[in-house]
Amino acid sequence: MSITLTSLYEILPKKCDSKADLWQSHFVTLKDVLTKNGFEKLTSSSQQQNGHPGQDEVVTECYCHHKNGRTILVTCCKDSMMLDLNERTQPSRLSEYNECAEQLQTDLYKALRDYNINRVPTIRRGEKIWQYSECGDGRIAENNFTELLFDKTSEYQRVTIGYTKTYGKILLLDWVENLAESDDSYTTSLCGIDRGVTYQDKSVLILGGGDGAALHCLRKLNPRMITMIEIDEMVLNACRTHLRSCCGDSLDKYEGENYKIIVGDCIKYLEEYAREGRKFDYVISDITDVPIETNEKNNQEIKESWLSGAGWKFFKQVFNYSLKLVETDGIIMTHITASLNVDGIKRFEVGINNLDEEVDYEMFDEFVPSFCEKWMFCHIKKRTAQK
Amino acid sequence: MSITLTSLYEILPKKCDSKADLWQSHFVTLKDVLTKNGFEKLTSSSQQQNGHPGQDEVVTECYCHHKNGRTILVTCCKDSMMLDLNERTQPSRLSEYNECAEQLQTDLYKALRDYNINRVPTIRRGEKIWQYSECGDGRIAENNFTELLFDKTSEYQRVTIGYTKTYGKILLLDWVENLAESDDSYTTSLCGIDRGVTYQDKSVLILGGGDGAALHCLRKLNPRMITMIEIDEMVLNACRTHLRSCCGDSLDKYEGENYKIIVGDCIKYLEEYAREGRKFDYVISDITDVPIETNEKNNQEIKESWLSGAGWKFFKQVFNYSLKLVETDGIIMTHITASLNVDGIKRFEVGINNLDEEVDYEMFDEFVPSFCEKWMFCHIKKRTAQK
């Protein structure tokens, strides 16, 4: 198996008052550095940048290492120089590649003292497990999966559990991170435990929550009864086997002294409970970011527009039913999205301000290790509760 | 100001039993997708990969978007296809670029159903603040600095404090992350607070620790006396002003009821204290990863070899003196390195097993949010303490 290793460099003047054509004068220096590092020039081209009239000339040069197929693409403008180093090689040769990339940076730094020389750590493509994901504000995060413990596609979604060196085991649904062994903070924030919510003798409805972490955490707090409704039995099975440090023994059987797990579509049960006039002290919505609809057409729409359009229609339904089911002074708890997904949070706020009943809500964020970012949570109460 | 935006894609068969020349048959499909997305072929070349005799033919094609100067470099082999999308543009056009990159991925996914299509989130180069750093195992981590609050070069190092949306303010020394407002776990682990170390009536010597976080944390635990020795007054000044949520008022004056801050070289004071026969209950080494030597020649050597060679000589000195200063049942506490920097940890272990006195030690790791990884800590005791 071959992988493609890439490092991206930037060379920028330390001060921004540099003159045009400054880079022209450094071509020779750059070429010396590249030659010293074993690279030979293959091609060179100069052009006005396409489609950007008035922009400066851009010079592109391609260099190739004569020994190992490493290439460098150099793009120079008057105010910046970008280097793209690539090599297709065996994973075992990564350290050799890294040494070369490091050496190149050191040599550039020595030769171009008036410039900031930065390098993006090596990106790897072509490996068995994809390690990159995107945070709520577009930042890149790299994982270190060493093994996929479970990877099957259910009726609803792709269910994956992988082991990472940094976060322990992680549950991914459609390859989106849901919960890792490192992520206690997610569960305690979702359930408001750090915010003084107590569970003694309370009745709780968990929507989703198939990883079992919330259920397991709350069972220890002496609630009267927890009912959990998870649509995807494959998630329960996978977590029971591979994510026991999160769910403990709580998924071993579907009914215990003070809890019950129902495998089914929560919308159907919310409807039924509302009709029956059932009440809960707390409703905890731990539905995935990309909620599942059993109607295939709707499901596609939802997947395409999270927390907006069809997506929000689903959440609106969940929250309106939850308002019917929750006691007057009860709380609906939910996670929202990444705290830096500003648009998503705005859409959520517009949404909960337009539910069937007037509500008050409190939003707060908490850092979740495996997400590499702060996640937003919300506790919703009926406005009548305050009157 | 222009930035260079880069997305790196990989296209791999879902199953590994794909035949050679498979990719040849998908060139047409790929070209259709690229054409639909506004790209035109510029150049094409085919070659045996240089320096890798026996490896398969590699075809490289370069495409250019006729409207906005976006380019795609396509590299095809029999078992993988890599796409490098680049655009030099204004930061304000990032979302337009991201939409294009996203659309391309969707179209590739639709056209090549039997393949996994992955994309590295957009990398940005040419911006005012460099956002990328490398974890102990080579993983990339991206920050979201919006502002540099302090950025000056002292006699010893570059001292930077920046504000990030995710981790709050971060102190960087020579552009290496030292402590962020999110990183309580670093301080409580370093000082063993989560591990039952108590400070009531104890005497403490802190080496380094210029951010003031350990000092401020320990002052609240009623120690008899804390002495802190920090070499770089610029760090103290910068943190006093910009990192108050970590250091509180502890750096406002250099002497208080139960603490004293000395600006100086800790080696000199360790020597002096040892000569005087002074004793402490705890010595906490919070020296930066790249320790400072006042001797310029040694300093260069140390910077070039962390925890090995000249670098370790420095640490050995610190630990040997600390062993002289610590009470028989006292503890020397230190941070080590990233928990996935396996070589660094091995070198550390060899080092402390070869100190002047025999020691027992305990190592443990803790996730530090702004580092995006687990960090390793060590508590060292004299072996005689157990006898």
Image (spheres, coloured by chain):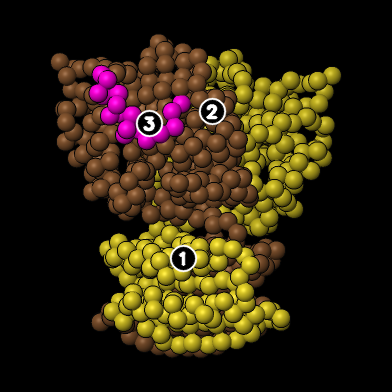
Chain colours: A brown, B yellow
The chain holding disc 1 is: B
Inspect the image, locate mark 1, and give the three-letter code of the amino acid beneath it.
Answer: Arg
Q: CA distance from mark 1 to mark 3?
A: 33 Å
Does residue B269 lie above or below B59 as drawn? above
Which comes before the other along the chain, label 3 or label 2?
3
Q: Quadrant of residue B380?
A: top right
Magenta-highlighted residues: A261-277
- Judging from the image, what secondary structure is the residue with disc 3 in? strand
* Residue A243 is at least partly visible in this image: yes
**Which quadrant of the figure contains the N terminus of chain B?**
bottom left
At label 3, which amino acid type do we have? Leu
Q: Tell me the residue at 51%/65% (across/down).
A: B115
Residue B21: % across, % down: 59, 79
**Which labelled disc corresponds to residue A251?**
2
Q: Which mark is residue A207?
A: 3
Disc on res. B274: none
